Image (spheres, grey):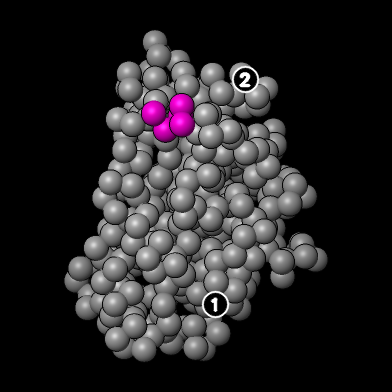
Amino acid sequence: MHRISTLRVSPLCLGGNVFGWTADGNASDAILDAYVEAGGNFIDTADSYSTWVPGHRGGESESVIGGWLRHRSDKATVVVATKVGKHPVHRGLRPANIKICLDGSRRRLGLETIDLYYAHEDDPHVPTAEWLGVFDQLVSAGDIRHYGLSNFTAERVAEVVGVATAEGFALPVAVQPQYNLVHRAEVESAGLGAVCAEHHLALVPYYGLAAGFLTGKYARDEQPHGPRAARVRSYATEAGFDVMDAVVGVADELGIEPATVALAWLRQQPGVTAPIASVSSVEQVPALMAAAEVRLSRSQVHRLTKASAAFA
């Protein structure tokens, strides 16, 4: 187990964006059961999942997770993270909006207290001290245990910490950026990793498998397909497939799945507490969870880092 402030979390976080989307209720329950039975306890979702699906209103993922939690006797050991700010009807970090959205998330999840509550994206229209004050109140009231920042730049993370410190507010404990072998610049060259290290913030990167691209299921000579195709196209370049060749090479050496290698590389990056990855079927859970145990050699890490240098 790793720590995010007072939270003890498994080294691999299960992404909930698929629940109620590419994984129906039964499949989601099976995935969640398998994840916990394999030693996982850290689940990530958002109130906006899955508003991109025609007919969905948002909150579908939270509702699925909440239904699953109600039948678990060990739910107190499960750490749940959700987010506010990107729901198309309740967008932004206005104080009233945060409180309305939190009430909805708690109702759907069936939880009195959210373990980790992220600002899903920055909001330049609301003064930083204003929305930080609300997060501070929510921590003090016991409505949330901790809060974090998702999709914030390095500069804004530093500014948020500075404002919270000056105002005497609770400090953020985690930052959630996109980070994987084909998307490195934000954390590395843009300085987000350094800011997190300076302020002792846990890095909990999403898209650990680059929307499935790093599982190795896409070939150079075919167009990406399936519900994530639009997201995968940005990775499915010659440079992206060169990275996949290196991932597959290491996977073959170790006799494990490419997805396991990609997540293991991410786990071994400085400051990373728990990469987030999602699966659409229970059969995919073992490859994901194996990344919590596999430790790549320095040579293997170096080869993957070199192969993905174009993305740094």
Depicted 274 relative to depicted 76: above or below:
above
The part of the image, by quadrant, that contains residue 279 is: top right
Image quarter (top left, top right, bottom left or bottom right) of the N terminus: bottom right
Image quarter (top left, top right, bottom left or bottom right) of the C terminus: top left
In the current view of this chain or complex, which residue is farthest to the left?
A: 125
Q: Is residue 116 left or right of residue 187?
A: right
In the current view of this chain or complex, which residue is farthest to the front?
A: 298
* Circle 2: element type: helix
Q: Residue at x 55, y 66 (%)?
A: 4
According to the image, label 1 marks what residue?
145
Task: Give the residue type that dot 2 points to.
Answer: Glu
Depicted 12 relative to depicted 234: above or below:
below
Q: Please provide percent x and percent y for residue 234.
A: 31, 31
Q: Which residues are magenta?
A: 302-306
Q: Is residue 29 left or right of residue 117?
A: right
Q: Residues within 10 Å of mark 2 (few under 14, many from 20)?
A: few
Task: Give the residue type that dot 1 points to.
Answer: Arg
Q: Please provide percent x and percent y for residue 261.
A: 56, 32
Q: Residue at x 62, y 60 (%)?
A: 2
Q: Please provide percent x and percent y for residue 93.
A: 31, 72
Q: Is residue 176 left or right of residue 64?
A: left
Q: In this view of the protein, which residue sits in the foreground, 54 or 98?
A: 98
Tally the marks.
2
Cα distance in 3D space between marks 2 and 1: 42 Å
Badge 2 or badge 1: first in the primary sequence: 1
According to the image, label 2 marks what residue?
253
Q: Residues within 10 Å of mark 1 (few under 14, many from 20)?
A: some
Q: Is residue 242 magenta?
A: no
Q: Residue at x 47, y 55 (%)?
A: 271
Q: Please provide percent x and percent y for residue 89.
A: 33, 63
Residue 275 visible? The answer is: yes
